[in-house]
Every structure is written in C-alpha cells, then in structure tokens.
Amino acid sequence: MRIRYSRMKLYLVFLFVTVFCGFADAQSLSGRVSTKIIDEHSKGVDGATVSLLNVKDSSLVKVNITEQNGSVSFEQVKAGSYLLSVSTVGYKKVSTQSFNINKDNPQLTLADIKLETGKMQLSEVNVQARKPFIEKQIDRIVVNVNNSIVSAGSTALDVLSRSPGVLVNQNDDISMKGKQGVIVMIDGKPTNLSSTDLANLLRSTPANSIDKIELITNPSSKYDAAGSAGIINIKLKKDLRYGTNGTFSVSAGQGVYGKLNTGLNLNYRNNKINIFGNYNYTYREGFNHLVLDREFLHPDGSLVGAYSQDNYLKLPIYSNLAKAGMDYSPSKNTTIGIVLQV
C-alpha cells in the first residue's frame, strides 16, 4: 500500500509540474519576425514604415521603422497569423503574404521585401498638410497619435505598445530598444511612478487625448542621466484658440467584448492666462482563455493518464481620469503653471 501511495504521489507531482510548465509555456510564447526592405537596386531603404497587421481583421499589432541598412524586426509577437505592410515616400505601398507564428515556428526571417518607385502623371496638384503617423527626426521618433485611426477606442498604453522599438511585458515593464529603465514623461514632466502605477495611469488615459508621443533613444545632456536607457514623452492635446472652447468625444470598439472611451475638454485662453480642464472615462472588458489538453504516455506507448483544463477569466477595467490646471505667461518665454490630476 505504501508503494502504491508513493507512486500515486509521484504521479500527481509529475502531473502538476507538467501542467504548470505547459501553462508557463503558453503564457510566455512570443515570437520574432524580421526582414529587410530594399529598393530596385537591392539597397536597404532607411526610414520606411513597416506595419505588422493581423490577417483576420487587418488591425494594427505593431509598427516599426527600418534601420539605415533597411532591416526591421518585431519582438514579442504572440502566436497567430500576420502580414507586413510597407510604405514610404516615393515608393509604392507593398504588403506581404500571410505568415504564422506558433510554438513550432516562433522565429521567422522573411525574404527581402523589394519596393518599386511610385510614378504617376499629375494633371492637377492639390496640396494638403497632414503629418505622417510615424516621423523619424534627427534625435527622436515621433508617433503622431492625433487624428490617427490607431487612437480610436484605444488607451495610451495600447498606442505605446504598438510604437516603434517599445515593448511592454506581462509585468507592465516598459523597455525601448531592449533597454530597461526608460523614463516616461507627460508633457515633459517625469511621472515618477512604479511600473504598475504607470501602467494603470496609461490604461486610464484615452488615446484620443494624446497629440503625439516622442521616443528619444539617445537623450541629450539636457536630460537626467537616469534616462540613458531612453525617454518617452507623451504630449497631450492643448487648445491654442483664444476665448472659451470645449470638445466632447466618444469612441467605441467591439471585439469579444466591447470597449468605450469618453472625454470632455474645456479651455479658456487670453493673452496671459490659460485655464483648462478635462475628464475621461474608460471602460474595457478583457479576457484570458487558456485551454490545456495533455496525455501522458508510458515508454511502450500505452496511455498512463490524461489532463484537460479550460480556464476563462474576464478582466473588466473601469477608470476615471480628471485633470485641471492654469498657465500664466508673464512674458513670451516664461510660463508658470499648476496642474491637478486625480
């Protein structure tokens, strides 16, 4: 009896360890996709915008820009079916065939993607000023969130996780270009929050309240040395019109569950004083569905046991974010302000 009991205990321990490892593998599965963008002369194209899209609904998963030699990669890609879309000034937009990331094929190096020069005859020129979604400047990359389809129904953390070179892991730690210790600023002011508190703040900030995000991988000497890993500066929208102005916005999305963002912005400005306030409400319903089916075989191939588990977890998120403040400008180059945020 003792021998059978010991064997049963050993079997249960083995079963637990196997299931736990399987759960960890399922949770940590993330792949990598890399390729190179070249022109008609097989030379790497610098600064091309490459978007990783979900095949099912063409939704944006991640966006990146090519290095000087034309190379580009996407890290921490979850299992699924994707395609790449490449666009840059002077070339025709190109999309790849679909490809899969899974447990058997987590690392993919796609064939070089060749771009063709865009040529067209113009009978009439109509100039419209509109900033591109991604701008590559000398010392930073700028993500122009304002008026972008990416901001619809999303939060600041969603937009940040899709931005070039930025990774947000399961513990809500934010890294840039593989470096930890990134300083996150809002309107040029450090947040000074823990990774969890910062993630909660970004989740409660709707993307439609953001003007742009600056990604500074090599900060200049004017920034604190602690920001050597990189600086992310989130610039919120500001109403520069004189007098009293206000906006009200509503955005919604539907996946497995729905999500909703609403916001109210009020602003008064004259020559020296600017008084502003806004309120945003966010509702999201996330979920985690994990299905495990395992069979345990004897060395001779006979079935020893089996295990089946179906876990479904709903993650509702409700957030309220209010902000009010005043700026006073005694001179053209001086502004004194106070901001209260709850």
Image (tube, grey):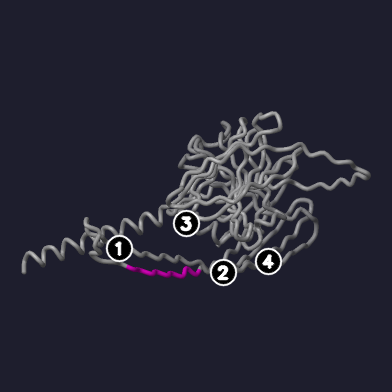
For disc 4, the neighbor class at 10 Å (few under 14, some 14 to 19, many from 20) is: some
Residue under the image location 64 percent in, 68 percent down = 252
Residue highlighted by disc 1: 295
Where residue 255 sits, quadrant-wise, is bottom right
Instruction: Give the mark nearest the N terminus, 4 or 1.
Output: 4
In terms of secondary structure, where does tag 2 sit?
strand
Q: Quadrant of the C terminus?
A: bottom right
- Per the image, is 26 magenta? no
Instruction: Give the mark nearest the N terminus, 3 or 1.
Output: 3
The numbered dot on residue 283 is: 2
Three-letter residue code for mark 4: Leu
Question: Residue 3 placed where, x, y %?
Answer: 7, 64
Instruction: Give the mark nearest the N terminus, 3 or 2.
Output: 3
Residue highlighted by disc 3: 197
Residue highlighted by disc 4: 264
In terms of secondary structure, where does tag 1 sit?
strand
In terms of secondary structure, where does tag 3 sit?
helix
